[in-house]
Image (cartoon, helix red, strand yellow):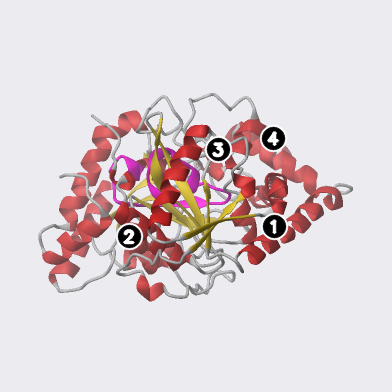
Amino acid sequence: MAVGTAVGWREGLDAGDLSSEALVRASIDRIHSLDGHLRAILSMDEGHSLQLARKADARLRAGERSPVLGLPIVLKDNLHWSGQQVSCGSRILNGFLAPYDATVVGRLISAGAVPVAKANMDEFAMGSSGEYSAFGPARNPWDTALVPGGSSSGSVVAVAAGYTPLALGSDTGGSVRLPASFCNVTALRPTYGVLSRYGLTAMASSLDQVGPIAASAADIALAFGVMAGRDPMDSTSTDLPGSERLASLHPGKLKGLRIGLPAEYFGSGLDPGVRSVLETALEVFSAQGAEIREVSLPHTRYAIDAYYLLCTSEVSSNLSRFDGIRYGHRARAGSLPEMIAETRDEGLGSEVKRRILLGTFCLSKGYYDAFYLKALKARTLITRDFEQVFETVDLLATPVSPGVAFPFGAKTDDPMAMYLADAFTVTAPLAGMPCLSMPAGFTAGLPTGIQLIGPAFSDVMLLETAHAFQSLTRHHLEMPPLSA
């Protein structure tokens, strides 16, 4: 069966021209055909997925309709799907099965979506390239010698390679948006709290968000509308204004739309090819009557430092639970302290250890005020920048990354160079703002995206704006040249 879109398959399922079982079988077959090379998938339960598909078909025959009923979906392997592996891309969780569904997963399954696989990822979502999975990296389907981006590498590759039309990732500082740019798909990081984090393995709790991934904004809207909203299991969750518009997304009005270009995002470090693609994309908005104006977010220069101080501090706290006592891998050692130390040494990779050590240092006596507290203050200033700029513009347009996908190994020996790949994606999460990456074109044969950032709770407007852009362009329809 040909690769399709979520919206197209939704129409076919509702009309009776397609069956969920056929779509799920096609997804499974495509994974078997391509994933030996792309390595996007960590685990599958084909029998369970087909059983869910048959139940979805029965609901369709009974006349039930839902935005995701019968659609196959891939889940990042840090999301709980009851009874299934949840490894977080790490050996320390070897053999651990999720005891319950994450709220977003449970809502999708209740609405009839069919998970078909758990996706590869950077270990515990710590990485910008996809190279830090304990099980080997996923590969960019546009050029398998290049990284796909991280940390939601497998989820993005699954959509880009046509395994499924929808996938879930997580985004702490760019983990769905960066790989989306590298692999030519669309990904949304919602306003903090709009999607429940219950059942998402915590990395940095004040920054983590579940992020839907698809070929287009219209496809994302189908799943997003089902998942969004307050959850009693997550005290930080909240309702989404305008969510009723997601079931049938319409293109937003571009005429009169005020789009800000932050000067800090368009400096000398931006690849000329990426800059050219963005300028061409912005011409599409201008031609439809949007107003493009330069703005400033002056405290952006503190974003990388503040993000990595806060993120690693929260990593140090959250990952202390992985000790070999309650679940996952346990080392054979004498005393309890020796067992915990050996378990963490054997089970955790180099990047995870680096961030735990950095975070522990930031939180230690004598350094808390000098590092962690200052980072919190910088975060407040960054948030104020956004609040002030959104008094004069409706949304911001920026690059997603300074460049395109790079070769494996190019930055693994230089952690700072790897962290700087997030230079344009970490700022909005510090302020809790929604942001979206969508295909904008190609440079040197490789895809690059444009990032839209909106004020808090403007998620639906962002998707409608992206849908308007995608109704006028074809970048998101380009597929990588794949063969079995």
Q: What kind of element bears circle 4?
A: loop
Q: Amino acid at mark 2?
A: Ala
Residue labelled with disc 3: 402
Q: Residues within 10 Å of mark 4 (few under 14, many from 20)?
A: few
Q: Give the image location of residue 211, x and y in percent.
A: 46, 55
Residue behind mark 2: 218
Q: CA distance from mark 4 to mark 3?
A: 49 Å
Q: Amino acid at mark 4?
A: Gly
Check disc 4 and report the residue beneath it.
334
Q: Residues within 10 Å of mark 3 (few under 14, many from 20)?
A: many
Quadrant where the image shows the C terminus: top left
Instruction: Say above or below: 422 vs 80.
Output: above
- Of tags 3 and 2, the one toward the viewer is 3
| Residue where numbered disc 1 is placed | 382
Residue range of the region highlighted in magenta in the rendering: 158-186
Marks 4 and 1, how far apart in space?
48 Å
- Magenta span has 104? no
Q: Secondary structure at mark 1?
A: helix
- Spatial distance from mark 1 to mark 3, Cα to Cα? 20 Å
